[in-house]
Amino acid sequence: MAEQLLERRVRNALDVGCGEGLWRAALRRERPHLDYLGIDPSAYVVERYGARRNIRQGDITSLDALRLRGTFDLIICNDVLHYVAAPELREGMGALAKRLRGVAYLGLFTSADDIEGDMKSYLERPPSFYRRAFSRAGLRSAGMHCWIPAKLAEPRAALELSDA
């Protein structure tokens, strides 16, 4: 999807809340020269995988403090946002959107989803909460958990966007 919007191959990706960097392997299978940067709050992850997989310590609220250079064709933030408190989510989404020039894959669950699993830190919120947060950050839905900057949404055909 990012390549369709950018009309070229994806060159780089930022993975926020990357864990061990599993998305890196999948992305590099398709794009061997892709520059990957992972961000994760776990000191263990950074110590064990950081140097080999280009993972730095941080979270969605520390993107500005990390002094990331440039923007990214693809930003992944999967299975993270439904654990982030509202003020931090708003701050983090603004920082994330500033760094996005292609597609943000924001995989998460809402109160409208029937989910099972460890719910200890899960913050149950309605879909409208996330739609508002993403919209405030200047993002538009492109469907399938993908969001794009408003400037990329403008030239899209009406049925390309899920909220059109």
Image (cartoon, rainbow, N blue to C red):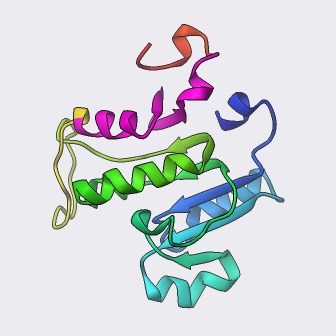
Give percent across and percent down for residue 162: 44, 20
Give percent across and percent down for residue 150: 53, 28
Quadrant assignment, res 129: top left
Instruction: Indicate left or right for 85 with 23 as reference.
Output: left
Residue 143 shows in this picture: no
Q: Is residue 49 above or below residue 116?
A: below
Quadrant assignment, res 13: bottom right
Residue under the image location 73 percent in, 35 percent down: 3
Give percent across and percent down for residue 76: 53, 53
Q: Is residue 140 above or below residue 64?
A: above
Residue under the image location 78 percent in, 30 percent down: 7
The region drawn magenta spans: 129-155
Instruction: Indicate left or right for 38 with 117 as reference.
Output: right
Outermost residue, top side:
158
Residue 126 or residue 116, whichever sits in front: 126
Quadrant in which the C terminus is drawn: top left
Give percent across and percent down for residue 54: 66, 75
Q: Is residue 39 above or below residue 3?
A: below
Q: Does the magenta stretch include residue 14?
A: no
Residue under the image location 81 percent in, 36 percent down: 8
Instruction: Indicate left or right for 47 with 12 as reference.
Output: left
Task: Report how many numbered discs are placed on residues in the image.
Answer: 0
Q: Is residue 61 above or below residue 145?
A: below
Q: Is residue 141 magenta?
A: yes
